[in-house]
Amino acid sequence: MNTSNIFGFEETEKMGLRKGVVYYFNDWIDEKIISILEEIVEQFLSLTQAQFTKKRSGENDAYVNRRNIRGGWKKVFHRAFDNFDDSNILILDNCTPQQLQTIYTCIKVTNYRGSSHFVYSYLYFQFPLDIEWSTVYQFMEYVNSKLTIHYASAGYEMAFNDLCPKSSGYGVRALNQLKYVNSEYTEWNGLDLSTRFGVPCPNFIQILCSELTQKMASEIPDELHGKLLNTNLFLDILDRKSEKMPEPALEQIKSRYQKLYWLLKSLLVSPERSMFMKKEDWEKRLRRFEEIQS
């Protein structure tokens, strides 16, 4: 068991908490961008000091059980993305049936451009919990310098072990008690292909393109931190008392999240309900930051 998180959540072989980052970007996928994506994954592994051991790849088998990686992750990466055509998916992690993964990466890239939908490529990373927020922030700065980021978000994520039956269902239901934790199944999946693109929820760190920041209704409150990089706004609720940029205490998190929620209110969109969450629980989750307005 692992309880080394501010929520006291106990990790099992099925599920646990990680620090995660998701990116939505709209670069045209060509050899140059594929090379950049490879560099980004290399940087992620350098920061985590871990290695991938499992894979899922390809549109047709992206949701079957993970397979062992043979010959290294780069061989798998190039098999998935060399001779890239329209779209593809690659998922890499290091789970076993007995142990939840400590790292996870999902690369979902596309050159499809819909006439009635927003369509973006998608990157998702889960870091071990002991990674400092300053490291996550720097990683986001690095990716922001490499890709045309439309929106990115970082915070606590629920990790699921697909080698354990029903882990996704158990993990999503656990989110009913975890207001400040997100997941692919509840916030991120489907936003890359959407009729209304926006921000699903406030988070510890977010990157907003200029198109999104122009829709914000007010100035950034004093308790929040914002800065412009390559025309994108980095916005977060972290402390600046040390170089590690720790998250504030839970009461401060609550206060800052509420301020952030109302700052981003005009940008918020409602994701589709997860199949693992009851309708009433889902509706409550969508309102989780509405109850107190500062």
Image: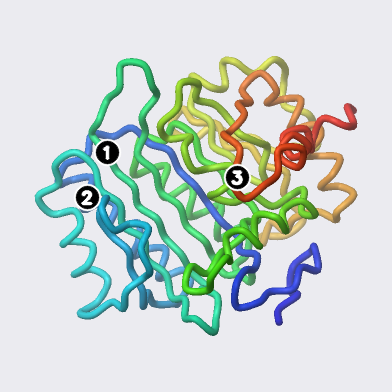
Query: Residue drawn at (61%, 22%), measured in percent from left and top?
Result: 267
Residue closest to the eye, 72 or 167: 167
What amino acid type is highlighted by mark number 1? Answer: Thr
Q: Could you tell which of marks 1 and 3 lies nearer the N-terminus?
A: 1
Q: Are marks 2 and 3 in contact (CB under 8 Å)?
A: no
Q: Residue lying at the far left in this picture: please name it.
A: 83
The answer to whether the residues at label 1 and label 3 have Cβ atoms under 8 Å apart is no
Are dots 1 and 2 in contact, CB under 8 Å? no
Q: Residue 281 lies in what quarter of the image?
A: top right
Q: Disc 1 designates what residue?
A: 110
Residue type at mark 2? Ile
Which element carries disc 2, helix, strand or loop?
helix
Q: Amino acid at mark 3?
A: Thr
25, 147: nearer the viewer: 25
Answer with the quarter of the image where residue 291 lies.
top right
Q: The residue tagged with tag 3: helix, strand or loop?
A: helix
- x, y percentage for residue 174? 72, 58
Residue ID at (23%, 34%): 111
Front-most of residues 287 and 264: 287
Identify the residue position indicated by label 3 in the image.
186
Q: Residues within 10 Å of mark 3 (few under 14, many from 20)?
A: many
Work out whether 220 lies above or below 14: above
Q: What's the CA distance linking mark 2 and mark 3?
A: 28 Å
175 displayed left or right of 258: left
Identify the residue shown where x is 77% and y is 38%: 280
Circle nearer the N terminus (2, 3): 2
Task: Residue 61: give its label.
Answer: none
Residue 270 at what x, y percent from top left? 62, 29
Instruction: List the residue tagged with mark 2.
Output: 34
| Residue 121, x across and y down, in percent | 35, 39
- Mark 1 or 3: the one toward you: 3
